[in-house]
Image (cartoon, grey):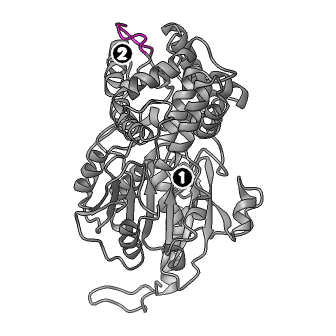
Amino acid sequence: MFKPRKATAAPGHVMLLPAALAAIALLVTSCTSDKDPVGPPVPTLDPYYRQTLSWGSCDGYQGGEELGAAGIECARVLVPIDYGKPGGDTARIAISRLRATGTRVASLLTNPGGPGAPGLALPLALAKSPVAERLDVIGMDVRGLGASAPHVSCRSVAEFETGQRVLGRTDPLAEIDQVEEENEDYANSCARRTGRTLLAHVGTVDVARDMDVVRSALGEQKLTYFGGSYGTRLGSTYAELFPDRVRAMVLDAPVDPTTNIGDEVITAAGFQQAFDAYAADCAKAPDCPLGTDPKKANLNYRALVSPLIQHPIRGLDYGAVITATIAALYHPSSWPDLTKGLTDLAKGRGDALLGEATAYEDASSDDVHRAVLCLEEVRVTDRAVAADIVRRSRAAAPAFDDATGNANASAPLDACAFWPVPPTAQPHVPKVVGLPKVVVVAATGDPATPYPGAVTLAKTLGATLITYEGTQHGAAFEGIACVDQPVVKYLIDLTAPADGLRCSKT
């Protein structure tokens, strides 16, 4: 606490008495021109960092009933929409808290990824982990979505449902001009409904700054953080901005900081690798819908799903079945559902796959997802470049090659080519100085964020890398003792695991 110094005169200086101070103040006042007013104080970020949280019921929050039943509290944190203008419009960030059941060490801020995945319920997933004994687990809906406000809004629910073929699920037979027109309309709609100010400030840097305000509001001098998938990009960005404010950080299923968040060619190769692993597992059963020869799985899969391009089955079109397949490839626990869905499809039924596709997509978070990508990925404004990306993606993932348009000299530009606000960040090698030891966790067969990106991130941050030999997206807090035990120990007492640790199921 700051204490004023005792009033003593320094050698060679005159100590002014109260009467003298008053006279000088009067003199200064009389000499100040009305044309040169002092004016109000310049707004700063101090009030945001000094705010006190009001924890209470999660009623009225998205998913609040389930949170409340688990003993989770909720609150909102006030942040500026534009950190360059602290006195301007504000946003309210919804956070949740699962209190530590034992002697508390710190608060653990979490993020599930996305961009655009609501995180308010993430503490539920960690409730049975040992970290919940010593750490308050904090969930957070990032700016623009969920229980936070205001929202990024580009389409109504009805528009989202009817527009999936162009924006969420590419229609391989659509005319290029038609697709681009709808993409441009979507981009303009985002600006109109959301407002340009918020749309320009939903990116990773702004969310990382929100995380620091949340840290302060929680009463923590330093941040303890767990982020998965895109949450690792948030973590590495926070580390760039505030390296001296990091206590501990675990980054699971990392996004390569030097590439686009959703690099199409890289992720295509990752999902093909996961598809190959699924096909090999499926082929062990005599009734596998892809056959018993894994080498023919790509061809058999395309033969099964390609007819949906021109002949959807009661709402299940080609894009939906690809979406359902991708969703199932994130984790082996979903492989049996994919097998059942493909078996049903072979019999002319598509309800199961349609349900999986619908569950995977969410209207509000999809808008935030696209807004962040358009702010931070290298924008493609040349159809020939777009066509080259499509060709390379198809070559990297032959299972998902719809066999149309390969000879096209051009391809439609996506919504980011028409985005109404300029980029706010670009892929780069993070420059971090003074960061304490952090931990990176990665699976060798991660479909969404392939393993080489984890190696890059760990090297860049000087982090300890834990490698899990398996095919899934994310390995921490998945019940893998070899991964979880060192991660928990690190988060609680800051003992970093040995570098180069490798784990497997067996």
Q: Nearer the viewer, residue 189 or 260?
A: 260
Q: Which residue is mark 1?
A: 86
Callout 1 secondary element:
loop
Q: Is residue 114 left or right of residue 189?
A: left
* In magenta segment, residue 404: yes
Q: Residues within 10 Å of mark 2 (few under 14, many from 20)?
A: many
Q: Is residue 308 left or right of residue 55?
A: left
Q: Position of residue 30 (x, y in %)?
A: 54, 63
* In magenta segment, residue 452: no
Q: Which residues are magenta?
A: 403-412
Q: Nearer the viewer, residue 268 or 6?
A: 268
Q: Which residue is mark 2?
A: 387
Q: Residue at x 48, y 82 (%)?
A: 20
Single out the mark in the foreground, 2 or 1.
2
Q: Nearer the viewer, residue 132 or 306?
A: 306
Q: Position of residue 459 (x, y in %)?
A: 22, 55
From this view, report whether residue 481 is shown above or below residue 274: below
- C-alpha gap between disc 2 and disc 1: 43 Å
Q: Nearer the viewer, residue 218 or 394?
A: 394
Quadrant (top left/top right/bottom left/bottom right) for the C terminus: bottom left
Q: Residues within 10 Å of mark 1 (few under 14, many from 20)?
A: some
Q: Is residue 186 visible?
A: yes
Q: Is residue 194 left or right of residue 485?
A: right
- Inspect the image, locate mark 2, and give the three-letter code of the amino acid beneath it: Ala
Q: Residue at x 59, y 47 (%)?
A: 88
Q: Position of residue 312 (x, y in %)?
A: 63, 17
Q: Earlier in the sequence, mark 2 or mark 1?
A: 1
